[in-house]
Amino acid sequence: MAQIYFALVDTPGFFASIIRKVTGSDYIHVVLSMDEELQEAYSVGRRHPAIPILAGFEREDTEKIERAFPTARYKVVSLECTAKQKEQIAGKLQECYEKRYQYHYCVLGLPMILLNKPFYQRNHYTCSSFTASILQEHGIALFDKHFSLVTPRDFYELEQTETVYEGTLRKFNRLNGCYPVRRRNMFRQMWQKLSYVVNGVY
């Protein structure tokens, strides 16, 4: 048997608070990864951590996320699958990444989750609906509902997973040998402070 991984993410901010209300969970984002260090990890989310309105399919960059959200918390869990399923999922993720600008965040899907009404707009996903769709496509059916209704809370409550790590992103990065970059110039520091304001950290 092989393993794939999910990272459940808790970040501060106004938009995150809206998603918390919709999903009823502190963890408001799901990342699908081929390894527990999140070196080959993908999700539908912010293209840049500091800019919530620009969202689509992207590769996870935990160092960049830590810079934008120093207090972020992560829970990484593993799920068993076959070696063939893992290989196929990895190939599909790479294919999606090559066409990443064709994928977008499904804002219209959020109220549908509250109404419990399946909703699919071509190439538009939430982070959790994308992950659920990919898994279902490759024979891993974890949820007894349409993929568009799957939320981060559903992944959090999965009984088939095993916790690999739970704690701050900062500690996770250090455990995996990821350290802060050199001191940023004045423009970058101002941009970071602006991102804190936009995302409700201050």
Image (cartoon, rainbow, N blue to C red):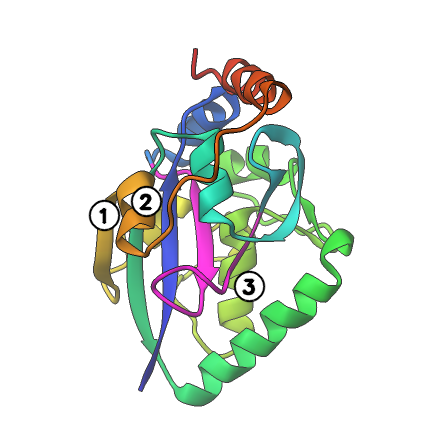
In depth, the one of 160 and 166 nearer the eye is: 166
Whether label 1 touches label 3, CB < 8 Å? no
**x, y percent for residue 125:** 62, 50
Q: Secondary structure at mark 3?
A: helix
Other residues around mark 3 within 10 Å, as few (<14) / some (14–19) / many (≥20): some
The verdict on residue 144 being magenta is: no
* Of the two numbered discs 2 and 3 in the rendering, the one whose residue sits closer to the viewer: 2
Q: Which residues are magenta?
A: 27-44
The verdict on residue 34 being magenta is: yes
Q: CA distance from mark 1 to mark 2?
A: 6 Å
Give the quarter of the figure containing the C terminus.
top left
User: Three-letter amino acid code at disc 3?
Assistant: Ser
User: Three-letter amino acid code at disc 1?
Assistant: Glu
Counting residues from the start of the chain, the first of labels 1 and 2 encountered is: 2
In depth, the one of 60 and 21 nearer the eye is: 60
Q: CA distance from mark 2 to mark 3?
A: 22 Å
In the rendered view, would you say 111 is above or below 163? above
Judging by the rendered image, the residue that carries numbered circle 3 is: 133
Q: Which mark is residue 166?
A: 1
In the rendered view, would you say 81 is above or below 168? below
- Determine the image quadrant of residue 39: bottom left
In depth, the one of 100 and 151 nearer the eye is: 100
Q: Is residue 123 left or right of residue 77?
A: right
User: What residue is shown at x 44% (from left), y 63% (from top)?
Assistant: 33
User: What residue is shown at x 40% (from left), y 46% (from top)?
Assistant: 152
Other residues around mark 1 within 10 Å, as few (<14) / some (14–19) / many (≥20): some
